[in-house]
Every structure is written in C-alpha cells, then in structure tokens.
Image (cartoon, rainbow, N blue to C red):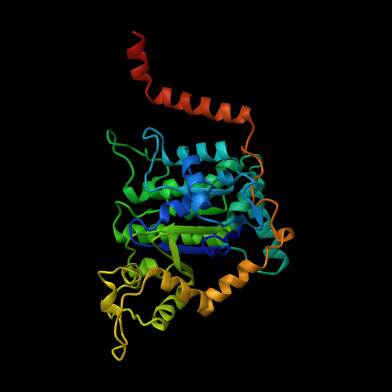
Amino acid sequence: MATVASRGTHAVDAATAMTLLLGPPGSGKTTLLRALAGRLDKDLKDEIKSRVSGEITYNGHSMEEFVPERTAAYVSQHDLHIGEMTVRETLAFSARCQGVGSRFDMLTELLRREKDANIKPDVDIDAFMKRASATEGQGASLVTDYILKILGLEVCADTMVGDEMRRGISGGQRKRLTIGEMLVGLAMVLFMDEISTGLDSSTTLKILNSLRQSIHILGGTAVISLLQPAPEAYDMFDDIILLSEGQVVYQGPRENVLEFFESVGFRCLERKGVADFLQEVTSKKDQHQYWYRPEETYRFVLVKDFVTAFKSFHTGRTVENELAIPFDKSKSHPAALATTRYGVSAKELLKANIDREILLMRRNSFVYMFRTF
C-alpha cells in the first residue's frame, strides 16, 4: 500500500481508497495528476517550481528516493492499443514487460495473513493461489487471468482489441483494458485523467465498480478525475478533492463535503447532483443560486476565501495535522515503492518484444508474403 502526501496543495491520499478529483475545465486537474505521478515535462516542472512551493512524498519518501514512473501509473483519457492483438495477449505483454513478481508476492502474503487471523479468504484470490501453486513459474499468465476476472474482461479475453479498420471490443472494454495494463504491473497508485471520455454513464459505472473491487482486493490508491460524474458514480468514491483556479478548495471524506459548504453559506439544491454542485459553487455565474442565508446579503465568495475557510474547517485541520506528522518510513512495505527503473531484465524485455513481433507477423503473414514477392 502507498500513501501519497503533497504538502504544496494540502492533499493527502489515503491508502486503499478511491479519490474523486473534481474541478471546472482549466482548474489544473491534469497538471496535478501528472505531477503526483512524476510525469511532468521538464519545462513545465521548472515553471511550476518557480511559482509553487511544496513536496510530494510516497510513504514518507521523496520522489528522488524511488522510481515514481513505476510506483505510480498515469492513465490518460486516450486508449492506445495494438488492434491486432487480443485482450489476453495485450495484458500478458504488459505483465511480461513490467514484471509481476511483487504483485504475486503480495497476493501470497495477503492469503497467509488471512489464514493466520482465521479470516475466510476471498474466493477469487483463494482459487487464484491454488492454481498458482500447481503451475509454478507462470506468474505473468496467472496475474493476467486474475486481472481479467476482476475487470470483467473474461467474456472478451480472446477477442481482438480492434481499431479504426478492424472490428473489436467495445469502448468500455477498451477502457478497462487500459486500466488492466496498469494493474498487472507493480504500480500501487493509479492516477486516471478523465477516464469517462466518450463513454456513457452506465459503462463508466461498470468501470468504476471493477476498479473499486480491484483497489480494495489488491490494496492500493486511485485518484480519478471525472468531469460530470453521475450520482451513482459519485457515491462510489471514498474521498473528494475539489480544485478551482489551481487551488484545493476541499480535500477529505465525501460525507463531509456538503457540511463544509453549508458552513460558508452554500447548500446543494434538491434534485441537483452533488458533483455538479461542487463544480458550480466556485463559479461566478452559478454560485448565487446556492446561497441559502436570506438574512445575509449575498456577495461572491472568491476561491481564496473558500481555501481559507477550509483550513479552519475540522476536515481541513485533520489534513494539516496529518501532514505535520512525517510518515514512519519503517511502516512502508518493501514492495510498495519501486527502486529500479525496469521490472525485468533487458533479456526478458527483448524476448517479450520479439515474441510479440513474431505473433504480429504470423497474424499478418499474407501482407509480409505479398511484400516479399
């Protein structure tokens, strides 16, 4: 499990939790996710450092002490896959390249602890580990099969992914495949940017449900930005981070967010989605309709005033107190943070890529024969 702390933005992401990142367009959601994942471009990173002070740590370790690109996975809103490979082959290739040793060891440790505490193990994990003991040395394929089951991709496991020229899996399955490519690896922290783009609310809900199940079973942290989540999708999250004009207006449990805004004079209207309310309450055009203190004259509340009010709110004080106490590095699981740039040897990477190219050549043998003659 990994705990992420960012002192510059007053944000804390608790382990084994799903956090919803909300904010109007241009509020800085993508920049925050990329910064936390260690994926910022060098020029943008230098520009941010000149204007923003703060420190990002994972389990108390600064980003110079480990490899953030392998510890945290950043999932953009675009799905990039090879259309001529099946879903199973795509996940298997990702697993071979990233290495699944630590993921396999963590599942083993989870099962052992459950047995020691006389806890009935999860049915899927128990079946997975029994199969693992009978097929030693096939960790990559076993983890692939388990992720297929968690994400509900078993029905299309042997279906071509497809592209603009080939018929393949649906948009929702494609998005789940993108998430699965990250889950088969070492990363215990997932940062997902607008994963609902191009999907209907029903498909988004299924993806979030699959993701929530995997997060709570495998242990990890997910921070997901959504533009207009449905009420059912909103209720699936544990914590909320609300950004506006590059500042954190609220960060904490989902159950306390409405209480905070009521403390400053704003109440969500009946039949209004909470997510929509949160994104409009800081807007100059929409804010006035949520004012519920008729005895007081309404005036536009600036973002910086919300930020100041949150610091004195009980949830804000809790966040400050958590940040004030350094994380005990000794409590960090050895496999939680990646310290090497690659999960497998160069020989294994080369072999995985050669096997993939041979597979694609066989699948397009007619094209290669035509070119030869």
Q: Would you say 180 lies left or right of 245 here?
A: right
Q: Residue at x 51, y 48 (%)?
A: 73
Q: Would you say 77 lies left or right of 326 here?
A: left
Residue 266 occupies quadrant: bottom left
Q: Residue at x 33, y 8 (%)?
A: 373
The answer to whether residue 341 is above or below residue 263 is above
The residue furthest bottom is 295
Q: Nearer the viewer, residue 75 or 136?
A: 75
Give the tally of numbered discs: 0
Q: Nearer the viewer, residue 11 or 210?
A: 11
Answer whether residue 303 is visible to the viewer in this image: yes
Q: Nearer the viewer, residue 272 or 350?
A: 272
The answer to whether residue 189 is above or below residue 46 is below
Answer whether residue 148 is visible to the viewer in this image: no
Q: Quadrant of the N terminus?
A: bottom right
Q: Nearer the viewer, residue 276 or 356?
A: 276
